[in-house]
Image: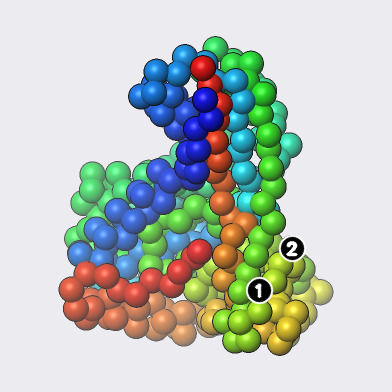
């Protein structure tokens, strides 16, 4: 007997992502999924972002790492709530993990939930978490070839942050080439150049986030338009 | 594991005791390695309804359709540009999926 199933094996994640999106839309909470290599500066970006935004926005952070709560410790005290997920070997976060925390940790009463994904430019791109915004990072110390080597991550992002720009004078990093490559991969990508250390570019990034929070708050009914991630 | 659950659940409803063959389709840009999947299937199916079943692992080529000129094409990394008009950003119409196509059992 031959049985045609045609069943997507990541269906469970897709369903959980849709559930998350519905909860977030109803509660008008903005969720931002941050993706980048280990050491790209995701946590440093969050540290400075929280310092800028926590005075007027209620923010929660979900930290994803294989092991340790080192990143969560760095962020505690900078925002309303920080929750660490240890994936214990898994290279990405999944929508079901996030959905569970949104409810259990009462995160639907915040303005923004940041999710710092596991440091990886490959697998997180294949797992929708139900986020409103996907933001990828590439640091100047990683090299200018990263967007072309890992194009799907940048193709599926709403914004890309070129981080650690204070190190540009010391690195062989062609900023114009990277910006051009990013725009070719994804012409609707918003690109920020930023240094969490010096603060250069941080205000522009924070204004962009604030505008998205305002847009989400003012959305009538549920269901903000979310770009298709095919 | 999703594969095992999907087949076990469906086979259970149909009264199928043993799966003899199945076909798994892996999209070219699904972020899944065929070799890793092959390795996993050889080890994770032991003691399950799929134990001993032969299988086909098939890569599905990605396809895109240009939103500007309408041309259908196979997107190529890193820029996935339309070969007709040179524009980027065309969505994939297939090539990111990972699915069980069919199984045979008795």
Q: Chain of mark 2?
A: A
Outermost residue on the right side: it is A172
Where residue B100 appears, x then y in whole percent?
Answer: 54, 39
Residue A65 visible within the image: no
> As rendered, which of B97 and A30 lies closer to the eye?
B97
Asked which secondary structure carries label 2, the reply is helix
Query: B36 above or below A25?
Result: above
Q: Position of residue A152 (x, y in %)?
A: 63, 63
Q: Is residue B28 left or right of residue B51?
A: right
Residue in view at x 41 percent, y 55 percent: A129
Whether residues under marks 2 and 1 lie with C-beta atoms below 8 angstroms apart, the answer is no
Quadrant of residue A109 in the image? bottom left
Which secondary structure lies at badge 1?
strand
Task: Determine the CA span between mark 2 and mark 1.
Answer: 24 Å
Residue drawn at x 41%, y 82% is A208
Q: Which mark is residue A149?
A: 2
Residue A196 higher or lower than A61, as above or below? below
**Residue nearest the observer in this picture, A26 or B95:** B95
Q: Which mark is residue B9?
A: none
Give me the residue at 49% from left, 65% from top.
A229
Residue at position x 70%, y 79% in the image = B82
Q: Is circle 2 on the same chain as circle 1? A: no
Residue receiving disc 1: B72
């Amino acid at each position: 007997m031959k049985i045609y199933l045609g069943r997507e094996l990541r269906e469970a994640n897709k369903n959980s992502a849709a559930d998350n999106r519905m909860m977030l839309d109803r509660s008008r909470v903005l969720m931002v999924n941050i993706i980048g290599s280990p050491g790209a500066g995701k946590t440093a970006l969050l540290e400075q972002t929280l310092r800028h935004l926590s005075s007027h926005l209620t923010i929660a952070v979900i930290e994803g790492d294989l092991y340790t709560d080192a990143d969560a410790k760095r962020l505690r005290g900078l925002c309303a709530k920080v929750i660490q997920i240890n994936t214990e070997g898994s290279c990405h976060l999944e929508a079901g993990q996030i959905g569970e925390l949104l409810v259990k940790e009462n995160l639907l009463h915040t303005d923004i939930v940041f999710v710092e994904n596991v440091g990886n430019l490959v697998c997180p791109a294949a797992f929708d978490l139900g986020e409103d915004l996907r933001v990828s990072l590439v640091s100047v110390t990683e090299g200018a070839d990263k967007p072309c080597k890992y194009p799907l991550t940048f193709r599926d992002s709403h914004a890309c942050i070129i981080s650690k720009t204070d190190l540009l004078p010391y690195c062989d990093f062609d900023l114009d080439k990277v910006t051009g490559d990013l725009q070719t991969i994804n012409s609707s990508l918003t690109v920020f150049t930023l240094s969490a250390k010096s603060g250069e570019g941080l205000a522009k990034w924070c204004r962009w986030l604030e505008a998205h929070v305002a847009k989400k708050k003012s959305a009538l009914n549920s269901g903000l338009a979310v770009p298709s991630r095919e | 594991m999703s594969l095992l659950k999907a087949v076990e659940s469906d086979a259970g409803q149909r009264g199928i005791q043993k799966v003899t063959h199945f076909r798994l389709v892996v999209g070219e840009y699904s972020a899944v390695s065929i070799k890793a999947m092959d390795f996993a299937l050889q080890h994770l199916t032991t003691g399950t309804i799929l134990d001993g079943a032969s299988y086909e692992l098939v890569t599905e080529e990605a396809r895109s359709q240009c939103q500007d000129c309408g041309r259908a094409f196979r997107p190529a990394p890193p820029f996935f540009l339309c070969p007709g008009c040179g524009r980027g950003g065309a969505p994939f119409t297939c090539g990111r999926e990972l699915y069980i196509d069919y199984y045979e059992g008795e």
